[in-house]
Image (tube, rainbow, N blue to C red):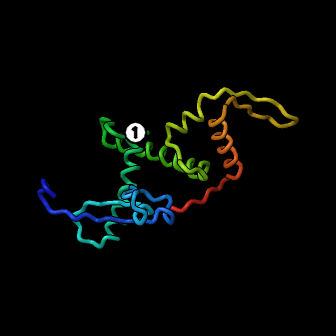
Amino acid sequence: AKGWKKSRRIVLIRKDKEKHEQSRGKLLFTELEEFSKYKYVAFRTNREDSSVMVWRMYNQRAECENRIQELKMEYGIEGFCLDSMWATEHAFRWVMVAHNLMALFRLTLLRNRKHVPIKSTIQFQCNAIGSYLTKSGRKTVLKLSAKEKRKEFLEGLFKNLSGVSPPFQFSNA
């Protein structure tokens, strides 16, 4: 392309949007019926691998970029540096523990949602809710003051929580 100092290759991926509902990409040529059923993704690369290999490599890398962005925005890892390298490393490791616990929370309790909210949204939905405890027979009941969407969100959490009990078994693969 004009202005590029080195040659690059453009790899285009076309996916059937009905078969791959969750896949990302752009709808192009929507006015043409034969093209409107596909989502398109383009990668610019200098690699000579097959198109499928380029897609697999960059697709995984794109998800890593999302995690890095989330760590910067939600956990403040960008720009913190302590006097000691070891202190910085330990602080970073504790941020990763917090991130992994939140990821476990999302995987366990928010598993059946179309859109999984980020940490700040979860904090907003779960914190600062007026509540009180009452007795119903021999049971203690937590009464929450929440309306509509927030109530649905919380009910979904409690519904999913009822099916969770330790010990937890998770694959690290």
Q: Identify residue for label 1.
A: 73
Judge from the rendering whether residue 137 lies leftward or rightward of residue 82; answer left or right.
Answer: right
Relative side of 17 to 107, left or right:
left
Hey, what amino acid is under mark 1? Met
Q: For this rendering, which residue is in front, 145 or 133?
A: 145
- Helix, strand or loop at label 1? It is helix
x, y percent for residue 135: 83, 31
User: 134 or 49: which is nearer to us?
Assistant: 49
Does residue 101 show up? no
**Residue 165 position within the rendered picture, expressed as x and y whole percent measured from the top left:** 68, 52
Q: How many marks?
A: 1
Q: Residue 14 location in percent, x, y? A: 38, 65
The residue under the point 42% across, 56% down is 24
Q: Nearer the viewer, residue 94 or 23?
A: 23
Q: Which residue does the image show at 68% across and 44% down from the upper left? A: 158
Q: Is residue 5 above or below residue 137?
A: below
